[in-house]
Image: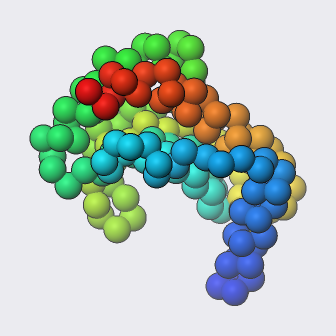
Amino acid sequence: MFSKEASRKLREDFWISFGKSFPRKWILYNTTVKDFAFKFHFDTKTAMVSLDLDHHDLEKRIELWEKLLSLKSILIEEYLPGAIFNDSYVLENQKEISRIYVVLEGVSIHNKNSWQETMVFLNEHMLQFEAFFEEYKDILIS
């Protein structure tokens, strides 16, 4: 069991180490599409890379989600075979978003032995998400 402070320190150490191991300027929130962002997540059970749609206007979120669905087979076949599409994903704060994500099970931010595997997973999958976005952003933005 880790104290809050020890857990916070491990999280900080992980993300600093990840940044040093894979020094790159990620797109993340700089997509030019409102409320369309790429995210990294790593906790005590899983690691995840996601594309989140959290537009406050449900109609706009649905419109963008439908564009992504039209590209689903391309995303899965050419970029991220394990991608999961969830049009109604509920965050811890109870906010509902739409999310496409890939997940790595059985790793923990509290276990330094799983850090390297997780860093490779995060890097490889975010690169694939970004490559997909760069290739099809004209369709998504239109």
- Quadrant of the rendering where the N terminus is positioned: bottom right
Query: In the picture shown, does residue 63 fall above or below 71?
Result: below
- Image position, residue 59 (x, y; %): 12, 41
Residue 50 appears left or right of 14:
left
- Image position, residue 90 (x, y; %): 32, 54
Looking at the image, the residue that sits furthest to the left is: 59
Query: In the picture shown, does residue 8 fall above or below 5?
Result: above
- Image position, residue 15 (x, y; %): 72, 63
What residue is at 69 percent from the left and 86 percent from the top? 5
Q: Is residue 90 visible?
A: yes
Q: Is residue 2 visible?
A: no
Observer-nearest residue: 139 or 110? 139
- Quadrant of the rendering where the C terminus is positioned: top left
Query: In the picture shown, does residue 2 fall above or below 124?
Result: below
What residue is at 19 percent from the left and 32 percent from the top? 63
What residue is at 55 percent from the left and 32 percent from the top? 129
Looking at the image, the residue that sits furthest to the right is: 113
Observer-nearest residue: 24 or 7? 24
- Image position, residue 14 (x, y; %): 76, 63
Observer-nearest residue: 61 or 118? 61
What residue is at 43 percent from the left and 36 percent from the top? 100
Residue 2 appears left or right of 125:
right
